[in-house]
Amino acid sequence: MLATLKEVLAFAKEHNCAIGAFNTPTLETLDAVIEAAEELGVPVIISHAELHEPQAPLAKIGPAMVMRAKAASIPVAVHLDHGEHVDYIKEAIALGFTSVMYDGSLTPVEDNIRVTKEVTEYAHAHGVDVEAEIGALPSREDGSSNGTVDPTSLYTDPELAKRFVFETGIDALAASFGTAHGIYKAKPKLDFDRIVKITSLTGIPLVMHGGSGVSPEDYLKAIDCGIRKINYYSYMAREGVFAAKKFIEEANPTFYHEVADVAKKAMKADAKKAMIHFSNGYCHE
């Protein structure tokens, strides 16, 4: 069933857990994520990132996401992830997405506040929830570096986060506290005290970006500190590649759909494992 971001995050607060937000740029990933959530009986967020536009145009994958969410047996929020252009965000809203993220994290603070407020006013007028970001991760969504030598210089400032939330009226805040997009080269060191302070000052659900590759123990600590949404994609997608590669080498298949099915099953298994961690004991396989 189609759900709002506020609805699934309210569930997360009630159960002291986090909701997984999974990018679904293909039908295989879309089905893998929703089937995993249905089998576990947990709400889920399916996301489309603007950077995936070349591979999965919003105009094509968006309607499929909304349709699949409506048909699901569990609450599914349909979310635009890392929208960097207002027109693109408005397109997602027009397609029926229930939440959008404006990412102005690498723009000057005043510009970020101004555009985020504009997006929030427009989205709320259309019944759509908004996530935004203050502070930034040391890598972009595609895993490339943003050029910063000291990642801690990008961590979210709690007092600035308070001002940002108050002036923009957003519904969820993406905070930077030690995670990164893409595949980790070393174990991330998370600043849990920073999460606690931002939670207490802002009073809204916090979002962990770069959630793939974080240890189960750190997931639980972050959840206890106020994280209510965890973005997860890179490691799930990589499991699909690993499974497909092994299948091709061992079975020498003739048809692409056989490879796609193997990849989907591997991604579903990885997504399910992540959802179990995020549920903080709410569900078990």
Image (cartoon, rainbow, N blue to C red):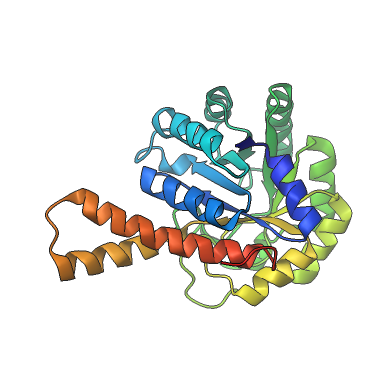
Quadrant housing residue 70: top right
Q: x, y percentage for residue 59?
A: 42, 27
Quadrant in the picture for the N terminus: top right
Residue at image point 57% right, 42% down: 73
Q: Nearer the viewer, residue 159 or 46?
A: 46
Q: Is residue 100 left or right of residue 134?
A: left
How many numbered discs?
A: 0
Q: Position of residue 238 (x, y in %)?
A: 38, 63
- 105 left or right, relative to 182: right
Asked which quadrant contains residue 13, the reply is bottom right
Image coords of residue 11 (percent x, y): 74, 50
**Which residue appears at 73% of the width and 41% of the height?**
7
The answer to whether 116 is drawn above or below residue 213 in the figure is above
Quarter containing the C terminus: bottom right
Residue 126 or residue 173, whichever sits in front: 126
Taking depth in this image into account, of 226 and 109 the one nearest to the observer is: 226
Q: Is residue 103 visible?
A: no
Q: Does the rendering let one see residue 44?
A: yes
Residue 212 image point, x, y percent: 53, 64
Give the image quarter of residue 18.
bottom right
Q: In this view of the protein, which residue sits in the foreground, 117 or 261?
A: 261
Residue located 80% across and 54% down the image: 14
